[in-house]
Amino acid sequence: MQSFDYIISGGGCAGLSLALRLIESGNFSDKKILLVDLSFNKSNDRTWCFWEKETGLFEPVVKQHWEKLWFYSEDFSTLKDIFPYRYKMIRGLDFYTYCLEIIRRQANIQIREARIEYIHSDEKESYIILNGEKIYAQYIFNSVLFKKPFLNKKDHYLLQHFKGWVVESRNKIFNPEEAVLMDFRVSQQQGTAFVYIMPFSKTRALIEYTLFTKNLLKDPEYDELLRAYMKNIPGMEGYEILEEEFGVIPMTSHHFPARQHHIFNIGIAGGQTRASTGYTFQFIQKQTAEIVKQLTMNKEPRISRFPGRFRFYDRLFLDVLTRSNKDSAYVFGYLFGFNPAKDIFDFLDAKSSLLQDFMVISSLPKKPFIRAALRDMFRVTPA
Ligand SMILES: Cc1cc2nc3c(=O)[nH]c(=O)nc-3n(C[C@H](O)[C@H](O)[C@H](O)COP(=O)(O)OP(=O)(O)OC[C@H]3O[C@@H](n4cnc5c(N)ncnc54)[C@H](O)[C@@H]3O)c2cc1C
């Protein structure tokens, strides 16, 4: 019978972040740890962007950062200086390679490539099943979403989906000091849509077309939208596509279970995606840091969630995003246009004070939120 102190189920962002934090703390070299994923032969399947003031644990793999962010809409544009924050970017493959190189050097961590068939925990035992074999652990940290969450009739559920190209332009058309966080000057017909541009140099950038809708588009449609957008970038006459990425992030007010006995859900499976924005990376860092802190104090991990009022704001915001694409562009515009960076980031990080909440909320257009609040109060089924 195989038994471990901890099993890390899923070796994506959350699983690898947790493993690295356990190693980095230096307090767990006597613990037997099993890390399982379908495959550790990872590709550059995603790019993470997030804001941070401090030097983070993954600073060595930050490919680029920006202190100035553009916001564009049909009505107005603004360039926001976000210092002392930095908007950072990490390429998926750099992150996976960096983490796995460190993890593979640890004698106490076993890595297995297999499909976890089943996961279970009750008062008596906790285990996963791999190739028909039960493997036991004191604690299981799980980031595998074994099935799509069963949605309640009142749950909002939207897909944030995006396709991006890393392009090399013939002309020097980008400013590597300034990124475009959101450009809403694109068709809002299919749903809330915007483009972001993360420039690496004067000629190279990641250009990503993002939509918040119920259904995905067909692949050629994303290409068409990207091409049409790029046609309007002055000087973008000749370019080469170096890499492409496609992704889907569920944005939902669904309440993901935090734990089941000794299974602790982490990452998206543990509800760490901010429902109204899709940002997850930094919440995963916060969650895994808290787990390591509690384990270090010999305490059973306590999985923290977004405080209730932020879940309420997210429900309203998802309602606005679902029902009115035009309002969504306004809301983001007012949010970025009329608030200092600190208030915006604290609010989006779900750590703002009530006063900051008031300042941010009172800067937003009122009507769509009042309508959304009334629907929420009377529990009208989402559109
Ligand atoms: C393309 C893309 C771009 C994103 N960009 C950003 C961003 O810029 N900023 C941000 O904050 N968030 C972003 N996100 C959201 C979020 O940060 C990522 O999805 C992040 O990877 C979530 O981490 P996770 O560990 O919960 O899930 P994952 O990273 O998906 O890890 C889950 C792991 O479980 C493994 N697995 C699945 N089933 C099994 C099984 N049965 N047995 C064993 N292993 C299994 C998978 O192989 C995977 O490695 C992005 C998401 C995507 C898809």
Image: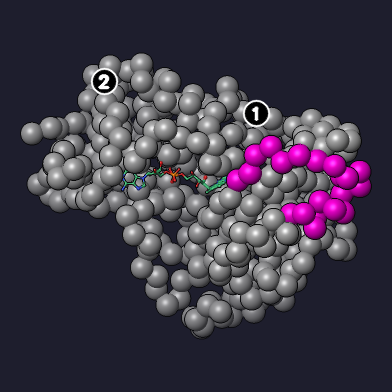
Please tell me which residue lies in front, 8 or 346.
Answer: 8
In the figure, is residue 254 to the left or right of 106?
Answer: right
Q: Which residue is mark 2?
A: 108
Residues marked 2 and 1 touching at CB (< 8 Å) = no
Establish if 313 lies above or below 340: below
Quadrant assignment for the N terminus: top left
Toward the right, the furthest residue is 234
SS assignment at label 1: strand
Viewer-proximal residue among 320 and 115: 115
Residue type of the residue flagged with mark 1? Lys
Q: Quadrant of the C terminus?
A: bottom right
What is the C-alpha distance between the residues marked 2 and 1? 30 Å
Left or right of 314, for residue 37? left
Q: Say the numbered circle drawn on residue 252.
A: none
Q: Nearer the viewer, residue 303 or 148?
A: 148
Q: Is residue 369 visible?
A: no
Residue that label 1 marks: 63
- Viewer-nearest residue: 26 or 59: 59
